[in-house]
């Protein structure tokens, strides 16, 4: 019954995300059409010139800007997904949000991160300055640019894919396998952070450094908290204390032998004459 309820809840939340996705796609299509029409007008042409002056949209820089910004968004989403996952595992979010929502949201941010990652790497193949081929994107350490740190990014990419696949085959694998694979998301986050920091053009900027150090420290802090909650959950529970003995009963001067503690005091048996004397 409760299983049926939870699958119904999951079904409705999936339907909500699907409707949201379709709405976003329709909005993007309408927006593109409006922008296309606007570009034909004199106002649109002058706007295009301004954009070109600002972002170099008709230069080799265009793809470079897109790949870098997509990389940074993918990194932030992966960080958010890691932080959210730690919040779910340490039951921190249970006080404020429903578990069904926190699980679905965790899955959603991971998938969104993969979407931006695909943009990050696909754009590299169209780069006019240093085009990448498919092998250089999929095989670690053969990149023409900073092979070690880009290779670390490729490993992170594969790990993120592996972890995300387990969301869909969860019912077919054991909980232990799911957990072990899920722990790999720590390695994928650390690899992504190292890749972003050491291969990014923006890393020398103080803002970028603050972002990488700040986000990394949040993960370290939450991981420590999660490990503490795990330890306290594993501690053996102390057996319940035995109930306190009842207070001693006053001595009965009419009895030769005093009753045992807890045994009700019985009055002396009455003689048939009704005096109770022996
Ligand atoms: C197949 C895997 C990957 C490849 C081939 C790849 C490739 C690259 C390259 C060539 C750069 C240098 C761009 C520049 O000139 O600045 C770069 C930077 C970057 N990548 Fe990746 N990457 C991959 C995976 C990832 C992953 C998994 C993430 C994070 C989730 C990521 C996030 C970033 C970030 C944030 C930058 C720095 C952008 C900047 O500051 O300029 N990349 N990547």
Image (cartoon, grey):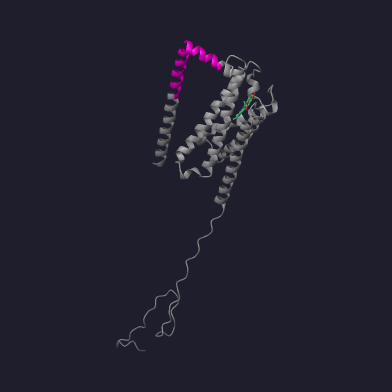
In the figure, is residue 172 to the left or right of 255? right
Percent position (x, y) of residue 57? 57, 16
Percent position (x, y) of residue 52? 56, 16
State whether the magenta stretch is mostly helix, strand or loop: helix
**Nearer to me, 54 or 223:** 54
* Residue shown at 42% from the left, 38% from the top: 6
Q: Quadrant of residue 213?
A: top right
Total numbered circles: 0
Instruction: Please report the bounds of the magenta region as a residue range.
Output: 24-51
The answer, for residue 170, to whether it is visible in the render is yes
Q: Quadrant of residue 53?
A: top right
Percent position (x, y) of residue 49? 54, 14
Q: Quadrant of residue 179?
A: top right
As displayed, is residue 75 above or below residue 252?
above
Magenta-span inclusion, residue 45: yes
Q: Which quadrant of the figure contains the C terminus?
A: bottom left
As displayed, is residue 44 above or below residue 272?
above
The answer, for residue 168, to whether it is visible in the render is no
In the figure, is residue 46 to the left or right of 190? left
Dividing the image into four quarters, tell me where ligand 1 lies. top right
**Nearer to me, 21 or 269:** 21
């Amino acid at each position: 019954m409760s299983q049926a309820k939870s699958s119904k809840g999951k079904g409705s939340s999936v339907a909500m995300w699907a409707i949201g996705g379709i709405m976003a796609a329709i909005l993007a299509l309408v927006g593109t059409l409006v922008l296309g029409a606007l570009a034909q007008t004199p106002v649109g042409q002058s706007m295009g010139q301004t954009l070109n002056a600002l972002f170099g949209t008709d230069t080799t820089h265009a793809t470079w800007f897109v790949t870098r910004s997509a990389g940074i968004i993918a990194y932030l989403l992966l960080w958010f997904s890691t932080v959210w996952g730690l919040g779910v595992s340490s039951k921190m979010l249970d006080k404020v949000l429903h578990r069904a929502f926190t699980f679905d949201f965790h899955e959603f941010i991971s998938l969104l991160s993969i979407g931006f990652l695909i943009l990050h790497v696909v754009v590299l193949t169209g780069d006019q300055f240093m085009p990448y081929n498919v092998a250089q994107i999929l095989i670690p350490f053969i990149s023409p640019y900073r092979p070690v740190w880009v290779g670390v990014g490729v490993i992170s990419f594969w790990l993120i894919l592996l972890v995300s696949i387990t969301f869909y085959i969860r019912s077919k694998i054991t909980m232990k396998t799911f957990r072990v694979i899920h722990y790999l998301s720590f390695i994928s986050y650390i690899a992504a952070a190292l890749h972003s920091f050491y291969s990014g053009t923006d890393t020398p900027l103080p803002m970028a450094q603050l972002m990488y150090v700040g986000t990394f420290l949040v993960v370290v802090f939450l991981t420590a908290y999660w490990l503490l909650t795990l330890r306290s959950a594993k501690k053996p529970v102390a057996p319940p204390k035995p109930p306190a003995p009842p207070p001693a009963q006053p001595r009965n001067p009419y009895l030769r032998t005093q009753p045992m503690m807890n045994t009700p005091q019985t009055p002396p048996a009455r003689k048939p004459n009704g005096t109770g004397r022996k």
